[in-house]
Amino acid sequence: MKILVIGAGVIGGYLAHVLHRAGNEVTLLARGAWKEQLCSNGLRIRHQLQRKDTVDKLRIIDRVDDCCYDAVFAVMQHQQMWSALDDLARVNTDLVTLVGNNMSAADMEQSIHAREVSSRTVLFGFQGTAGRREDGRIVSVHMKDGSMSLGCLHSLPSAEVMAKVEAMFQGTAYRLTWTRDMEAWYRTHLTLILPVCYLCYAADCDLRRVTRHQRKLLLDAANEACGLLTAIGSPVLPEGEETYYRPGFKRMLMAGMVFVMAKTVVGELVASEHCRHAVTEMEGLDAAFHALRLQAPDFAMPAWDTLRSAMPGWSELHKRWD
C-alpha cells in the first residue's frame, strides 16, 4: 500500500520504518535540516533494546504532493497537530490516523470533516515507543516491533477499515490494539503520564534523583486520577487500568516498572528526553487535565497536588528547556 507519514521525529520515524519493512510504499514528510539528513543518509535508527541498527531509504518530501495514498499517519506533539490539519486537507486519501497525545481529538475530527473531507475515516492512535534524535539518527526504545492503541473517537472503526490497517503491518510483530473510545483512552493515559512528567521536572529531568516516597506518590496520584475519571463519568481504558495503582499484586508490578524506569537509561529515553523537548505539550496536557478536574471540583487529589507543586512553574521550565 501507499502510505504517507507526516512527521519524521522519533515516533513518526519509527512508524515509517515498520511500515516500510512490512512491504508498503512509504513516503515520509520532513522539513529543514532533518529532511536533508534523511535524503542524504536514509532513515537511520538505533534500536536500543535490540542492540541493532537499521537504515531505510524512503521517499522523502517536504510538502504534500498530488499522490493518492491508501492511508496517512500524522505523528507529532499535540500542539503541533493543529498545523498538520492543513497538510491533511490537501492529501488525497480516505483514511487518516492522528498519532500522539491528543486532548483535542473531538475538535480536530470536527475540523477535518469541516474541510470538505467529511467522507474520510479519522482514527486516533498512540504508539508505545520512545527515544531521541542524535547524530543524524533516531535512538528508539520499543518492545519487539512496537505497538499502537487506536480507534475512532467513540467507537471501533468498521471491519473493513480494521482489516486494511492490520494489512499494513502484516509480517511484522507490531501490535495493534483496537480501542472503542480513544477520547477516554487519551484521558486515562494522562493519569500516569502527567505524574511522571511532574516528577521529571521536579528532579530536573534526572529520574535517578527521585526517592522511594516520590515513586509511591506517583502511583497514588495515578490512582486518584483514575478515580476522578470515574467520578465525571469518563471510562477508564484499557479496562482494569486502575488496578495497577490500587493496593495489590498489580501495583507491585507497576512499582517495579517505575523503579526500573527511574534508575536506568530506560527512564532517560522514555520520559526525561520527552519532557525536555516537549514542555509546551506537557503544559497543554496539564491544562487539559485541570479542565477535567473542574468538572468535579470537590474531588480530592492530595498526592497529585503534592507532585505537581514540587516542580518549577511552566514559565521557568520554558526558560530551562526550550
Image (cartoon, rainbow, N blue to C red):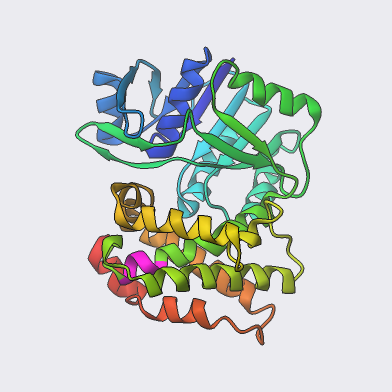
Judge whether residue 200 is colored magenta.
yes
Residue at (78% x, 45% y) in the render = 155
In this figure, what is the number of numbered marks? 0
Q: Quadrant of residue 211?
A: bottom left
Q: Which segment is the magenta one?
A: 198-202
| Above or below for 48 versus 230 | above
Residue 279 x %, y %: 36, 61
Q: Which quadrant does the C terminus fall into?
A: bottom left
| Above or below for 121 versus 2 | below
Residue 230 x %, y %: 73, 69
Residue at (34% x, 52% y) in the render = 267
Say left or right for 96 vs 50: right
Residue 141 appears in view: yes
Residue 209 x %, y %: 26, 66
Say left or right for 145 vs 90: left
Q: Quadrant of residue 122?
A: top right
Q: Of 74 and 145, which appears nearest the observer?
A: 145
Say left or right for 170 vs 128: right
Judge whether residue 133 is colored magenta.
no
